[in-house]
Image (spheres, rainbow, N blue to C red):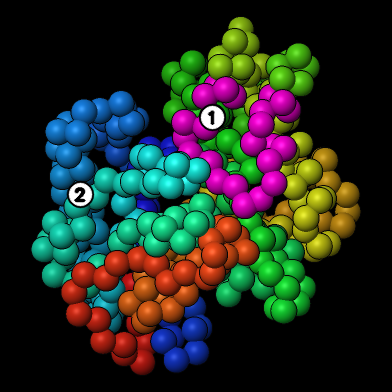
Amino acid sequence: MSGTSCDGLDVVLIEVSAATGDFELIEFEGFTYPESLMNRLKKLGDMEVETAGKLSRDWTLWTGRKIQDCIHKWVELGGAIDLVGFSGHTFYHDPGGKGTAAIGEVNQLFAMLDLPVVADYRSADVAAGGQGAPLVPLFDAHVFRDHAACMNLGGIANATFLPASQDKAVRAWDICGCNLLLNRQSMRLDQPFDRGGLMASKGKVDATVLSKLNQWPHLHRLAPKSLAAEDLLFLHGLLDGIVLPEDACATAVEWMAMAMADAVKGHARPGKILVTGGGAFHQFLLQRWSGHLSEEWTLDVPSDLWVEGKEAAAFGWLALRTAMGETTSLASVTGATEDVRGGVLLGNFATPDRVGT
């Protein structure tokens, strides 16, 4: 998968029991985009159709080769690959306007890999009146039931709130900008990201800007709700106006910590909060977030394999559900009229006893 940060590609190997649903995350590989490709991806929303089409083909070719490299290496570990989940790279997401779009030439990838491929995860949910996101909560509910919530700190911070009883509905939504905000400010000092939060820890919070950030309309909307990169323009504008990048990072961190703490206190039962995504390595953000929580909640940062690979693993698991004709998104999360069986399968897929994706 490729996320909103446009920084690289995540590829994972998972194994799932088609009979019992038992799940294992086995391998993770992260690939940083070449600078030229990264810059093109960041400009995707403003491209003419022909230019975007060429980028889609180029990106798919680059992505396909990386997936091929992983497959060749992982097959040598033992066992065949049965299915590939391909999320594409979303560049337009406006469920209010009933539209979502991603680049990624699925037929091109299918021809390169000669394996069944699942893609287009979101469109069916949007067609059913949903947000088309987030989709990972169904996976969270299956794998992390012992947690009160799961928080992914990617380009955007999103949360899944897991009830103690399976009879109650899972809730989830996008909370606020995360790495998209922090990385932009880090680039002002020619750093791709704020490693460990060192930059933010040296800055001072701008109270005036913090107050204005809290007026961002998304914070006050009721769920279901989701975010796209363009929804953060208001936030970027405020942070860009802070003179020192360190102060901008410190202000962004404090605002995110408060927003995420408010979400947990308002919607999560007491217990462990699983924290994954690149933001889980931002020690200063975790420190500030924890400082806004009471002892009822503890932040649980798993192994690096899970921190880096969880989102891609979830889409692999959803690919299997698409191939088996099972639910891939929850109405309680996306706001669709009903639980949706989404995704599109290319190629023939026969369910073995155990399935690796």
Percent position of residue 102, x then y:
32, 46
Question: Label 1: which residue?
Answer: 232
Percent position of residue 325, x then y:
38, 79
Residues shaded magenta: 213-236
Q: Is residue 310 magenta?
A: no
Percent position of residue 49, x then y:
19, 33
On the image, which quarter does residue 256 sit in? top right
Callout 1 crowding tier (Cα within 10 Å): few <14, some 14–19, many ≥20 = some
Question: Label 2: which residue?
Answer: 60
Position above or below: 242 against 176: above
The kind of residue tagged 2 is Thr
Q: Residue furthest right?
A: 295
Left or right: 188 in relation to 82: right
Q: Which mark is residue 355?
A: none
The kind of residue tagged 1 is Leu
Q: Is residue 216 magenta?
A: yes
| Residue at 75 percent of width and 47 percent of height | 263
Give the secondary structure at mark 1.
Answer: helix
Q: Which mark is in front, 1 or 2?
A: 1
Give the secondary structure at mark 2.
Answer: helix
Left or right: 295 in relation to 134: right
| Residue at 62 percent of width and 32 percent of height | 197
